[in-house]
Structures are given as C-alpha cells and as structure tokens.
Amino acid sequence: FSLVSSFWLLAAALFVVGLGLGAIEVGGNGLIVDLHTRDRGRFLNLLAVFHGVGSFVVPLYAAQLLSTNFSWRQVYQFAIILAIGLALFFLFVKYPRAQRGGEGLNLRTLFAAGFTWRMTWYYLFVAVYVAAEIGVASWIVEYLQQVKGFEIGTSSLYLSLFFAAIMVGRLGGSFIVERVGYLAIMLVATVIATVSLTIGIFGPPWLTFCIPLTGLFFSIMFPTATASVSSLQLANMGAILGVLFTFGGLGGALGPWLIGTAADIVGIELAFALTISFCVVMLGALLMLRRMARAEK
C-alpha cells in the first residue's frame, strides 16, 4: 500500500489490510471470550480501552510525522514495524487451549444458531451503534463549523474529546458492567446517549459539549454486546462473533454515507441528527432483546 500508485493496486492492498485488521479484531475478542469464562464484559471493555488508546494516539503520531515533512507513504511504512512486532508476538505466544470435544465449524449449526430472531436483533443493534459512533466521528467537525460556527481547532478538539470520552467510558464501564447486567447497562446508556446527542445537536452552542460527551455512553456498547452474545453459549461462537463484527463494519460504512447523502438534500444539521435516529433504533433493538430474555425466564 505504501509503495504503489495505481488506484486498483492501492484498493487491493487496502482491502488486504482491512482483512487483516478484521481478523485481529475477531481473534482478539474471541481470545477474551475463550480465556475468561466469567466477567467477560469487564475484560472486553478493558480490551476496548487499549483499542481506543491506539485510535487516539496513532492519528496524533501520524499528524506529527506529516507536519515534519514525512509523506503519507512513510507513515504507513513506519507502521510496518508495529505490524511485524505484532505478528511475532502472535507467533511465539503460548495460548492455553481448552478441550472442545472435537467441535468444528458446521454451516448448518452456524445458520441455526447465528440467524435466530434474537441474533438478528443483536446484529441490528451493533450495526446501528457503529453507524452512530462512526457517523458522529466522521461529521462532527463539519457540523460544528457549519452549524455552530466553531473554528477548525475547536471542532477538532471536540472530535478528540469524543474519542477520549469513549476511552474513559470503557475503563469505567469495566468496573460496573458485570454488576448492572449487559442488557440493562446498554439500555440505560442508550437512553442517556440519545438525550445527550439531542441536546448537543439542537441546543444552544454552549451545550454543544453534550455531543462529545455522548462518547462516554457509546463506549460500552460494542464490547458489552460482544459479551452478551458470548454469554448465550451458542455453537460456533467464533464464527458468530465474526458475523456480529461484520454487521458492525456494515454499519460503519453505511452510517457516514447516509449522513453525507442526507446533508446534500436537507443540510448538515438535520443530516447529523440521523445519529439520534440510529440511537432510537438501538433502543428498540435492546427492548426486544430484553423482552426475549425475560420471556425465557
């Protein structure tokens, strides 16, 4: 990716990079699920904290390199060192494998367990959550400049605060998620996130801080949803988590695109408010999941 100039070669290389990053995401969460049969929500949230640290630090590192006349290609080339180190770590680390009694991937079992009504609501929840998170991250700077009249520096700071809030929220959430319960804490966090986004978007400029504050309540959604699915004790859990993350990736692709398309039609203020609609759909999915959980009891 850092050496070629052809569009199709760049696209192909970036596609391979995406496959690798997706495999690391699925594998990392799968390891937590395998290694921690208890308190999975806690450890998945802690894992997500470090994911957030990387997401926060690396753009700053890249910006610093670019500001000192390094090219974007060199930024990616320096990242190769980290990628090699990660590969060596996975190559030599000893992983205590549990006895699984010969369980393998069975497509019929996967479809039977992974495409029930309950799992459909989980997939919808994760898709619209990621659409909301990436939608906010992708458009908050543009929204703040055009609608609230913020300067580029201030609007960029709000973006950083959004990611910082996600990190802090995941760290704090790791201590309470097991006590409150997976569905309950996601339900409460979704309600507060919806209110916070609504106030930040439609309120006066001095309440705009409520938009990045939403990251505090968004933070626990993805790792806690993963923990909730893993607690169902379904067959082919690794493959089911892969499907779950695929829907998350789909939401991450569609969310910002929908907001951008709507902005061309109705303007950025109403288009950015689509993130509130995503939260409402999240709330509906969680209510259905909670209803199903209560019906089983």
Image (cartoon, rainbow, N blue to C red):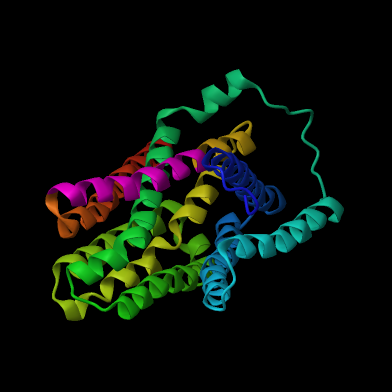
With respect to residue 148, does 124 lie above or below?
A: above
Report x, y in % for residue 287.
31, 45
Instruction: Please tell me whether residue 277 belongs to the stretch shown in magenta.
Output: no
Residue under the image location 84 percent in, 55 percent down: 93
Depth order, front residue of 264/46:
264
Is residue 252 something one can see in this rendering?
yes
The single residue placed furthest to the top in the displayed view is 108
Q: Determine the image quadrant of residue 247.
A: top left
Residue 140 found in image quarter: bottom left
Q: Is residue 127 positioned above or below 51 on the image?
A: above
Q: State the residue at coordinates (45%, 44%).
A: 248
Q: Position of residue 215 (x, y in %)?
A: 38, 67
Quadrant of the frame with the C terminus: top left
Q: Horizontally, is 41 left or right of 181 in the view?
A: right
Q: On screen, 22 above or below 205?
A: above
Magenta stretch: give its range. Answer: 245-265
Asked if residue 120 lies left or right of residue 29, the reply is: left
The majority secondary structure of the magenta stretch comes to helix
Horizontal side of residue 215 vs 275, given as left or right = right
- The image shows residue 261, relative to residue 158, as above or below, that is above
Q: How many marks?
A: 0
Residue 231 showing in the rendered view: no
Q: Residue 147, how many percent across, how many down?
A: 17, 68
The question of residue 251 being in magenta is answered with yes
- Report x, y in % for residue 281: 28, 45
Q: Residue at x 36, y 49 (%)?
A: 131
The front one of 6 and 145 is 6
Q: Nearer the viewer, residue 157 or 296?
A: 157
